[in-house]
Amino acid sequence: MSQLVDAAISRKELKGSNFEMTYAGVTSFMRRNYTKDLTGVDVAVSGIPFDLAVTYRSGARLGPRAIRQASVQLAELLTYPWGIDPFEHLAVVDYGDCFLDPHNPLTTRDAIRDHIREIVANDVFPLTFGGDHYVTYPILLAMAEKFGKGISIIHFDAHCDTWPDDEEYSLNHGTMFYKAIKNGIVDPAKSVQIGIRTWNNDFMGTNIFDAQYVHDNGWQKIVAQIKEIVGNNPVYLTFDIDSLDPAFAPGTGTPVPGGLSSAQALAIVRNLDGLNLIGADVVEVSPSYDHAEITALAAAHIACDVICLLAQQKARG
């Protein structure tokens, strides 16, 4: 009977799924094994409970916990629209959270970089939950060490996050991609930003598909353009939940009206097959501003679809 409950701590194998009471048990992401052992692992889900870089509402440090909790219903049935159990194809674990010292904030950059560095050193795909969006910068530092500079990003956001900031250790969730592009980590010509609806005088050469463009042109055209721009370049997917309209994601720090619907965002992510995806994150979920888990549910579905993309790719060989 032990296998019927708390599979996150009782399951013996990395692959496969167990039926559990949706409303009970250990809430790892989609009930995956909680472990720090990366042997034989394909994907490591982990949280970065950090929100000291926000410029408006705080609370995203509780995002990883909320996303995990919202994910339990996704572990109950075969995934939609995939119709598969991705864990038959992929060994996915919940690696827990990155340890941070909130009393020494200038240690944050290196702590996050080292956390991701350990994951990718084992040839494991990092799927990371923020936390505010600053966390993506040190993640990209670790990714560049592994895959080289000139990475592409597929960046969903209401904000471009390329405001100037020449201080390497400053904590600001609106300047990460300025630093990443300036330092050569990200190639802007091979990168896209989707859902943008705030102004910046310098988008630093990234390809902008603002929210209105998505509304006017539809997800099919957006997907085709993304694939043309990114090509075979190593690509990192970063999904700021505020790319969604506040009607679909109220639980975030800097909500902006006019954004994507959950349906639009999910359709784009679900069709990003064939790319050289090397890592992903979902950030800026702030549960204290959420209602009925709307935002956390959207974040969990985005993360699940990233796993399904990888599983589909592995199943095809």
Image: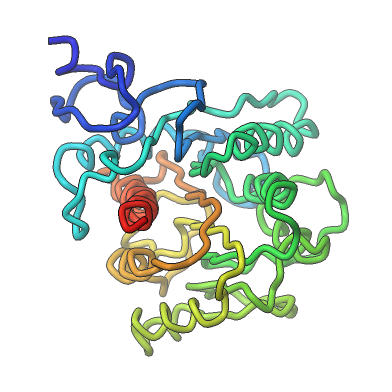
Q: What residue do we see at 53% from left, 42% from top? A: 126
Query: Foreground residue, 117 or 259?
Result: 117
Q: Up-down: is 87 above or below 104?
A: below
In what quadrant of the picture does the C terminus appear? bottom left
Residue 119, x across and y down, in percent: 59, 35
Query: Foreground residue, 304 or 260?
Result: 304
Q: Up-down: is 238 above or below 230?
A: above
**Which residue occupies the extreme front position in the image?**
317
Count of marks overlaid on the render: 0
Residue 46, x across and y down, in percent: 50, 34
Residue 98, x across and y down, in percent: 59, 29
Q: Up-down: is 238 above or below 189?
A: above
Query: Foreground residue, 200 or 112?
Result: 112
Left or right: where 181 falls relative to 192: right
**By what rule are the colours in the image chosen?**
rainbow
Q: What residue do we see at 63% from left, 37% from top? A: 116
In what quadrant of the picture does the N terminus appear? top left
Q: Up-down: is 243 above or below 119?
A: below
Residue 36, x across and y down, in percent: 51, 21
Q: What residue do we see at 80% from left, 46% from top? A: 170
**Which residue occupies the extreme right position in the image?**
166
Residue 63 visible in the picture = no
Residue 274 visible in the picture = yes
**Which residue occupies the extreme bottom position in the image?**
216
Query: Foreground residue, 131 or 235?
Result: 235
Left or right: where 75 falls relative to 40: left
Left or right: where 176 falls relative to 130: right
Q: What residue do we see at 40% from left, 49% from top? A: 251
